[in-house]
């Protein structure tokens, strides 16, 4: 008989209807600290609430990973009705969440396979869904983990930052970079690659940013094949909607969808941001 597995991720994943409705999927919320008071991402703090608070520069807002105890508590509960747990989390190079999960796995009486996705947001969700399908096809957790380590390298994720303020305040951009970028009206295109953030390109207009993304997708589709593209949005939908429409016209044979960014990511990017992500087959 196939062993019953619980699938665990964290709130940086895009928790869509399929994930919410799946009876065996669970997630641990990230911690957001606002003026020394802690909130749980998606539990008692929603994205719209955060963006309203970000408008007031006097608010001190930071994020932190869930403590190991939060994972121990969940894993212990799941041990009562599951045989094993597969726990898939955002990049260990961006957060200590993966480490918290590993520490918790050593403290519980149920086998836990912890996977570092080396990504976040919608690509993380895709990996969780892929893992579930692998299990349904008969693969064991260790085999699933090995395949995910290969699959995670196939995602391409880019983020267009309109306002550099939050990136600077969160420590992701130096003061010099922030000053020069703001002065010259430079919009960096941030790439998520091998688990970490880097600047892929610097442009001075939205049109050039969109064309940069289009060229990457064309190249990826020609060389590997792309079946789905996700455009990631915050509370400001204008730029994301525009990119969504541009990509629909450019790539009519590829399924393109709009996906909201999680609250935690908004702390670091602010609301004037648009992301785009795809997997190359």
Image (tube, rainbow, N blue to C red):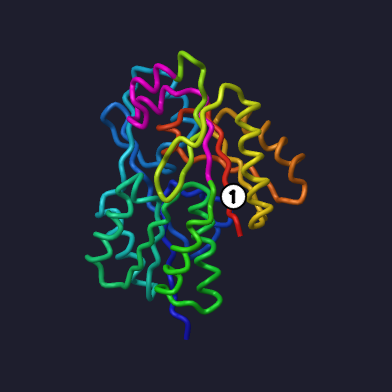
Q: Nearer the viewer, residue 179 or 257?
A: 179
Which residue reaches farthest left? 107
Q: How many marks?
A: 1
Q: Looking at the picture, does residue 152 appear above or below residue 147?
A: above
Question: Farthest residue in the top direction?
Answer: 183
Q: Residue 265 location, x and y as percent?
A: 44, 38
Seen at 48% across and 56% down, the residue is 153
Q: Position of residue 122 (x, y in %)?
A: 53, 49
Residue under the image location 52 percent in, 67 percent down: 132
Q: Which residues are magenta?
A: 157-180
Secondary-structure class at tag 1 = strand
The quadrant holding residue 40 is top left
Residue extending farthest to the bottom is 1
Eyeballing the image, is 49 above or below 178? below
Q: Is residue 5 left or right of residue 96?
A: right
Whether residue 177 is in magenta: the answer is yes
Which residue is at the front of the view, 167 or 181? 181
Q: Report the residue marked by disc 1.
A: 278
Q: Is residue 251 left or right of residue 110?
A: right
Query: Picture coordinates of residue 76 (x, y %)?
Result: 30, 65
Q: Quadrant of residue 136?
A: bottom right
């Amino acid at each position: 008989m196939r062993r019953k597995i619980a699938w665990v991720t964290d709130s940086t994943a895009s928790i869509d209807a399929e994930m919410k409705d799946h009876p065996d999927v669970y997630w641990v919320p990230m911690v957001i600290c606002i003026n020394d008071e802690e909130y749980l991402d998606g539990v008692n703090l929603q994205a719209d609430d955060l963006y309203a608070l970000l408008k007031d520069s006097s608010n001190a807002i930071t994020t932190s990973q869930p403590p190991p105890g939060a994972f121990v508590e969940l894993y212990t509960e799941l041990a009562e009705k599951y045989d094993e747990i597969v726990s898939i989390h955002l990049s260990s190079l961006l957060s200590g969440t993966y480490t918290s999960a590993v520490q918790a796995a050593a403290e519980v009486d149920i086998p836990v396979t912890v996977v570092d996705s080396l990504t976040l947001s919608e690509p993380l969700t895709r990996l969780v869904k892929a893992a579930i399908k692998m299990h349904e096809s008969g693969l064991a957790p260790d085999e699933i983990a090995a395949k995910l380590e290969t699959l995670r390298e196939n995602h391409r994720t880019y983020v267009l930052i309109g306002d550099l303020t939050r990136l600077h305040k969160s420590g992701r951009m130096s003061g010099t970079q922030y000053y020069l970028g703001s002065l010259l009206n430079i919009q960096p295109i941030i790439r998520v690659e091998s688990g970490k953030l880097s600047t892929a390109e610097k442009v001075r207009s939205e049109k050039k940013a969109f064309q940069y993304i289009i060229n990457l997708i064309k190249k990826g589709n020609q060389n590997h094949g792309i079946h789905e593209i996700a455009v990631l949005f915050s509370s400001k939908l204008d730029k994301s909607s525009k990119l969504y429409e541009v990509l629909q016209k450019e790539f009519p044979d590829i399924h393109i969808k709009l996906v909201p960014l999680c609250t935690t990511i908004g702390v670091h990017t602010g609301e004037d941001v648009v992301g785009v992500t795809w997997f190359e087959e």
